Image: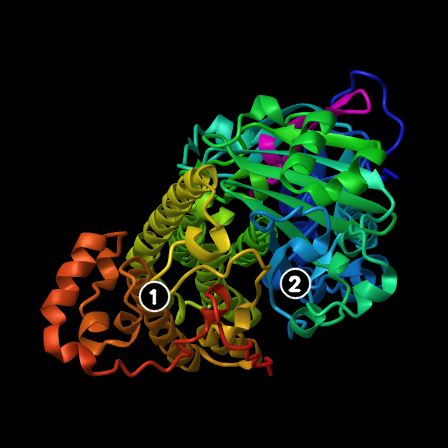
């Protein structure tokens, strides 16, 4: 339901006398409503929120339901929405990733490999119904006497003034209104009012698309099987996965360059297909019928149920990602949410960027001294760019690696460890607005940049190597079948120390990667000052550099079919973390240089057997539960 506090009767065509508000926010979506609430809770500023739509929230279902630790903490704790989230939305059971098993029917969940975190996070996350959540934000904002809301505006015009108050003009209920304000914040989403006006748009390297739709009722992936209920409950895979309900997770069904999400809402299920445009033609998937067919062909378990459901509503974006040259200015304007930058929905970072940007913007709005504001905006813009840019290689360089469970598990384990340490930990300690913390943070964070860039290229190269190897093996097997060779005895390649696991699903718990488990411990480092935070990040950086070295050594040992390489001190220390790439010839040379000294073992502090579930005759998984 739409409400606004605009004064009543007016003659059509009448122009109001000038109004004044401390902050004018353009756009009443998630970013704008959240920023308004943060300003009302944490500052004394009076806020005017304007929206072109007549209804807020709209009747159409809004996409972007999944939260992760940082955004969930922001919504629940900073905006004080925890009770509403617990009562009206599902608590989320982490992120799960699933892959079909080659050669299997894949028409039941039991055929799929899975990677996951088995225990719930110390920081709760949620699957939010955007319409319901935004309606509650608006209702709470309207309780404040410092909040004014105007919907259904037309003819919006923003006139920025570097020396004095800005002027925002618009028409509402038949009259023109002129508003003077020190601060204008654009949260108009893809309308990008200020970015277009100031020519701030900037392309990035991510060329992906998405199609999404909603169905009534719950699509529970655990029921997509021919197994009887008792067989499902007692299936041996439960030894690995446990018994918490899978449907509460954001379930990602993975293939090369694309993934399909299944997200539960109360009374509905959100479905979405995200794809690299170089690997999936948008024309093949940009309708409910086409997307359903595409999903059922690649993940046949959905053919049991998905075609039976009509879409409640749907939408799509053929090319959704973009950058922005600037998102905050000492001239007292800013951009948040999709009005500024957007990366990719994998890992649900949109809410995280809203949380970080809104927090920096709110602190800037509360700053009265011009000199202090100038310094803050310089630091905050640098920080905004850094946290956005760190995501880009993950999406632009190694989206193909989504198609392999082993490669993706290395990728996600690394990225999640970085996220826990350098995103969640500073945010829950209010450190991003601490001027004593920011320079050291940016210097430390910058050290990860070239490492991450190289790792993403390495992972993509490893995926392509594995893909080519499997294709060649498949061709050989076809020849052998034609000759009548018994594949079980003489048809499969042999002699490799690290053969693939075969046709059985693999179950991988991400916290087998000790670095990730240690990074999660930062959630318990609360109330630290800037000096202590720098110590924590220095420890986490050492852990992450060790993990990067482990990933590179593991891949090199796998490619060269030499398991001992991953523990050889001379070889491991010879890897240059700032210049990582998929380089078999370089690894061979490094192995030769290591020579006799390769027998000395590298002093790993992590579990070098963590990835063994992806190899034949692997030992039973050893799960280390998070504290």
Label 2 packing within 10 angstroms: few (<14), some (14-19), many (20+): many
**Residue 441 image label:** none
Residue on which the image places disc 2: 94
* Residue at 73% from the left image edge and 51% from the top image edge: 108
* Residue at 33% from the left image edge and 80% from the top image edge: 604
Residue 272 higher or lower than 100, as above or below? above
Residue on which the image places disc 1: 554
Q: What is the total number of numbered labels drawn onto the structure image?
A: 2
Label 1 SS: helix
- Seen from the viewer's position, the closer of residues 620 and 537 is 620
Magenta segment: does it hold 331? no
Q: Read off the magenta span.
A: 169-190
* Residue at 41% from the left image edge and 36% from the top image edge: 204
Horizontal side, residue 103 vs residue 392: left or right = right
State the image coordinates of residue 69 (x, y, percent, origin top left): 61, 64
- Compute the Cα span from label 1 to label 2: 26 Å
Furthest residue toward top: 13
Horizontal side, residue 61 vs residue 400: left or right = right
Quadrant (top left/top right/bottom left/bottom right) for the C terminus: bottom right
Horizontal side, residue 14 vs residue 345: left or right = right
Earlier-in-chain disc, 1 versus 2: 2
Furthest residue toward front: 484
Q: Quadrant of residue 118?
A: bottom right
Q: Quadrant of residue 379?
A: bottom left
């Amino acid at each position: 339901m739409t409400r606004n506090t605009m004064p009543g009767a007016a003659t059509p065509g009448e122009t109001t006398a000038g109004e004044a508000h401390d902050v004018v926010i353009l756009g009443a979506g998630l970013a704008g409503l959240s920023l308004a609430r943060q300003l009302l809770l944490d500052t004394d500023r009076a806020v005017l929120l304007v929206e072109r739509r007549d209804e807020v929230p709209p009747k159409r279902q809004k996409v972007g339901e999944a939260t992760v630790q940082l955004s969930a903490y922001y919504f629940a704790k900073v905006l004080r929405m925890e009770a509403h989230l617990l009562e009206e939305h599902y608590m989320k059971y982490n992120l799960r990733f699933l892959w079909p098993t080659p050669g299997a029917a894949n028409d039941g969940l039991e055929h799929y490999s899975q990677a996951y975190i088995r225990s719930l996070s110390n920081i709760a996350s949620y699957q939010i119904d955007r319409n319901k959540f935004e309606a509650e934000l608006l209702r709470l904002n309207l309780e404040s006497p410092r909040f004014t809301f105007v919907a259904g505006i037309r003819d919006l015009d923003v006139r920025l003034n570097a020396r004095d108050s800005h002027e925002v003009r618009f028409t509402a209920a038949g009259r023109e209104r002129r508003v003077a304000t020190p601060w204008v914040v654009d949260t108009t989403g893809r309308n990008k009012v200020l970015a277009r006006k100031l020519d701030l748009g900037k392309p990035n390297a991510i060329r992906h698309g998405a199609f999404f739709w909603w169905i009534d009722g719950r699509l529970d992936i655990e029921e997509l099987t021919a197994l009887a209920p008792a067989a499902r409950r007692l299936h041996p895979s439960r030894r690995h996965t446990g018994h918490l309900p899978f449907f509460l997770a954001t379930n990602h069904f993975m293939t090369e360059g694309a993934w399909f999400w299944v997200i539960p809402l109360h009374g509905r299920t959100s479905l979405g297909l995200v794809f690299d445009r170089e690997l999936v033609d948008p024309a093949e998937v940009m309708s409910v019928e086409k997307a359903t067919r595409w999903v059922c062909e690649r993940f046949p378990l959905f053919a049991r149920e998905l075609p039976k459901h009509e879409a409640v509503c749907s939408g799509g974006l053929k090319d959704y990602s973009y950058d922005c040259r600037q998102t905050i200015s000492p001239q007292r304007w800013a951009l948040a949410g999709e009005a500024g930058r957007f990366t990719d929905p994998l890992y649900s970072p949109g809410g995280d960027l809203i949380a970080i940007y809104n927090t920096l913007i709110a602190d800037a709005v509360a700053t009265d001294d011009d000199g202090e504001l100038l310094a803050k905006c310089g630091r905050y813009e640098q920080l905004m760019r850094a946290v956005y840019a760190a995501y880009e290689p993950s999406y632009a360089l190694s989206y193909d690696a989504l198609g392999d469970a082993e490669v993706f598990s290395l990728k996600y384990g690394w990225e999640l460890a970085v996220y826990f340490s350098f995103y969640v930990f500073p945010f829950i300690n209010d450190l991003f607005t601490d001027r004593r913390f920011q320079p050291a943070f940016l210097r430390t964070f910058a050290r990860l940049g070239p490492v991450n860039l190289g790792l993403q290229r390495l992972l993509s190269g490893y995926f392509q190597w594995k893909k080519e190897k499997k294709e060649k093996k498949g061709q050989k097997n076809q020849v052998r079948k034609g000759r009548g060779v018994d594949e079980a005895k003489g048809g499969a390649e042999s002699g490799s120390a690290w053969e693939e696991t075969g046709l059985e699903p693999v179950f991988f718990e991400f916290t087998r990667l000790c670095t990730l488990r240690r990074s999660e411990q930062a959630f318990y480092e609360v109330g630290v000052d800037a000096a202590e935070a720098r110590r924590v990040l220095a420890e986490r950086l050492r852990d992450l550099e060790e993990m990067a070295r482990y990933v590179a050594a593991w891949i090199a040992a796998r490619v060269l079919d030499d398991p001992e390489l991953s523990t050889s001190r001379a070889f491991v220390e010879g890897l240059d973390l700032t210049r990582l790439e998929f380089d078999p010839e370089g690894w061979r040379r490094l192995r030769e240089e290591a020579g006799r000294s390769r027998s000395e073992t590298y002093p790993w502090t992590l579990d070098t057997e963590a990835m063994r579930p992806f190899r034949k005759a692997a030992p039973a998984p050893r799960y280390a539960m998070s504290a």
